[in-house]
Image (cartoon, rainbow, N blue to C red):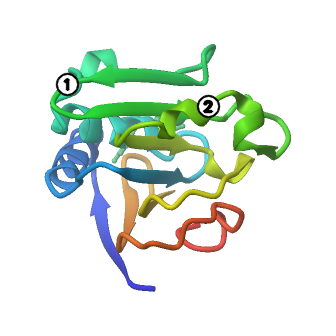
Amino acid sequence: MTANQVLSRSTEQTIAKGREIAARLRPPLLVLLTGELGAGKTTLAKGIVSGLGAATEEEITSPTFTLVHAFSGPVKVYHVDLYRVSEVQEFDSLGLEDLFSEPAVVLVEWPERMRLRTDWPVLRIGLEHAGEDARKIMVEEISADSSTSHATGGAG
Ligand SMILES: Nc1ncnc2c1ncn2[C@@H]1O[C@H](COP(=O)(O)OP(=O)(O)O)[C@@H](O)[C@H]1O
Ligand SMILES: [Mg+2]
């Protein structure tokens, strides 16, 4: 599996990278954002969702209490954050199965906390701390490998 790796040196650069990624995303697509707390998953999501024209950067915050934020613009976008899901759960038991009822771009933070099978294409993006304001962003090729049960094995 090939990964395209870049170094971001600021919050703004990560948002810009998200916008750049968004330009080549087409629904239906599941985007898995991995990386520890503060790695920049939500920041990258700001760039991706705003780049898709579904919301402004300010509207994209961590969906803490609801698990999911829905945005509708030229494409339907869902931003899911499973940080508060303590044990690995079946996706259906999270009540989120409707997200796949029509073509959308579904972004998931902490995807290792769910198990999901979908026939949608999957894009894995891993983020890592690389110094105070530096982050390594690893973007894998979009693949048809549709199981998230090994989400931590790829982009890290
Ligand atoms: N290069 C960078 N890329 C992304 N975020 C950065 C960067 N440098 C500093 N930060 C800061 O790190 C924090 C990342 O938070 P957030 O995106 O919410 O992370 P996560 O969703 O992975 O927990 C933000 O406060 C952001 O401003
Ligand atoms: Mg987050």
Residue drawn where x is 56% and y is 57% of the image: 118
Residue 61 visible at all: no
Quadrant occupied by the N terminus? bottom left
**In the image, is residue 114 above or below residue 147?**
above
In front: 70, or 82? Answer: 70
Looking at marks 1 and 2 on the same chain, the residue that comes earlier in the sequence is marked by 1
State the separation of the CA atoms marked 1 and 2.
Answer: 20 Å
> Residue 53, labelled with which disc?
none
Query: In the image, residue 93 lies at what x, y percent?
Result: 78, 34
Q: In the rendered image, which residue does mark 1 sit on?
A: 73
The amino acid marked with disc number 1 is Gly
In front: 152, or 29? Answer: 29
The amino acid marked with disc number 2 is Leu
Q: In the rendered image, which residue does mark 2 sit on?
A: 96
Quadrant occupied by the C terminus? bottom right
Query: In the image, residue 63 lies at what x, y percent?
Result: 53, 21
**Residue 34 falls in which quadrant of the image?**
bottom right
Mark 1 closeness class: few <14, some 14–19, many ≥20 residues within 10 Å: few
Asked if the beta carbon under badge 2 is closer than 8 A to the nearest atom of ligand 2, the reply is no
Query: In the image, residue 29 lies at what x, y percent?
Result: 37, 53
Judged from the image, the secondary structure of the residue bearing numbered disc 2 is: loop
Figure label count = 2
Residue 114 visible at all: yes
Residue drawn where x is 52% and y is 73% of the image: 145
